[in-house]
Image (tube, rainbow, N blue to C red):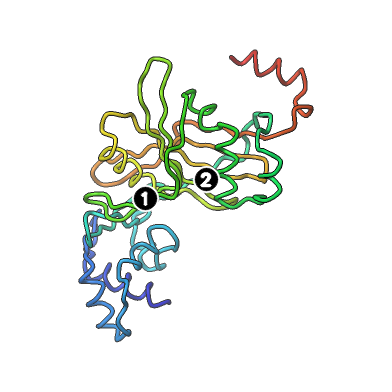
């Protein structure tokens, strides 16, 4: 195992009791675990839980300690404070059998030339130029910030790929935090939970609609609206709505397809 895996495993089992649905720990315990395992001093201890929240899988021993059909996740509970909590599922992916809705590609040609590919930045760019958040949500939306890094009370440091504000035809205001993923990645419940809490604290009078964006291919984009429920013992991640869009040239959408889309209204 890696250094981070050994430390997080040590901390988990030092606090875990059979049947527990949450396991609390703090940054000081990470330092003590590192010393106990005789590792050199780690400068950024916060990177250990951050890695397992967003980048790495937990050690196999911790995974096996979760009840059937559930997974352990790490959530922030304050500055330097964390909890292992149960989730089902902890991560989710777009479905494979969705109809692709053809949209005339409004991405400028010069942008396609110099910002090709399927990375997260290319995805955010195409979603913005084609107003896919507007189309998906049925709202008039405006991007106000991307790659936001900030600190949320009782959560800790967070990062949001892009934030939109939207207004409905009845005048209701929405805040839409978006997480963007490259093909093959999965959307994590921890990210959705922190996005919701950020919106609750920063925009208390607006309705929060967390969205997940993913390239299926260079011109195919999946958008999901996600929700999280907490019954006190376990978090549940669910899909509220999902659409797949195909960005095409104007001549690649047939009259029959346009008629079919109109009949679905």
Q: Which residue is mark 1?
A: 190
For the image shown, how many numbered marks are present on the structure?
2
Q: Is residue 36 above or below residue 61?
A: below
Q: Position of residue 241 (x, y in %)?
A: 48, 31
* Residue under the point 47% across and 48% down: 187
176 relative position to 129: left or right: left
Residue 61: image tag = none
80 relative position to 210: left or right: left
Q: Position of residue 35 (x, y in %)?
A: 25, 82
221 relative position to 256: left or right: left
Query: At numbered mark 1, what does the secondary structure look like: helix, strand or loop?
Result: helix
Between the C-alphas of marks 2 and 1, the distance is 14 Å
Q: Nearer the viewer, residue 12 or 70?
A: 12
| Image quadrant in which the C terminus is located | top right
* Residue under the point 63% across and 36% down: 97
Residue 93: image tag = 2
* Residue under the point 25% across and 59% down: 82
User: Contact, CB < 8 Å: mark 2 with mark 1?
Assistant: no
| Image quadrant in which the N terminus is located | bottom left
* Residue under the point 39% across and 64% down: 51
Query: At numbered mark 2, what does the secondary structure look like: helix, strand or loop?
Result: loop
192 relative position to 153: left or right: right
């Amino acid at each position: 195992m890696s250094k981070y895996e050994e430390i997080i495993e040590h901390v988990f089992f030092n606090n875990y009791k059979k049947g527990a649905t949450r396991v609390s720990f703090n940054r000081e315990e990470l330092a003590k675990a590192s010393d106990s395992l005789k590792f050199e001093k780690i400068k950024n201890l916060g990177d250990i839980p951050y890695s397992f929240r967003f980048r790495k899988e937990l050690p196999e021993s911790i995974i096996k300690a979760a009840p059937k059909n559930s997974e352990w996740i790490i959530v922030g509970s304050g500055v330097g404070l964390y909890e292992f909590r149960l989730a089902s599922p902890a991560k989710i992916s777009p479905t494979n059998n969705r109809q692709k809705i053809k949209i005339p590609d409004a991405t400028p040609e010069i942008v396609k030339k110099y910002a090709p590919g399927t990375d997260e930045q290319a995805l955010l760019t195409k979603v913005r130029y084609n107003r896919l958040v507007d189309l998906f949500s049925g709202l008039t939306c405006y991007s106000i910030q991307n790659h936001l890094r900030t600190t949320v009370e009782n959560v800790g440091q967070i990062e949001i790929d892009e934030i939109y504000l939207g207004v409905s035809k009845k005048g209701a205001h929405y805040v839409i935090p978006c997480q963007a993923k490259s093909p093959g990645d999965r959307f994590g419940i921890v990210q959705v939970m922190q996005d919701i809490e950020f919106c609750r604290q920063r925009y208390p009078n607006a309705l929060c609609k967390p969205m997940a964006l993913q390239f299926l291919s260079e011109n195919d984009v999946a958008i999901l609206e996600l929700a999280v429920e907490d019954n006190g013992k376990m978090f549940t991640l669910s899909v509220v709505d999902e659409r797949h869009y195909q960005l095409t040239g104007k001549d690649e959408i047939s009259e029959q397809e346009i008629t079919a889309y109109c009949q679905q209204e």
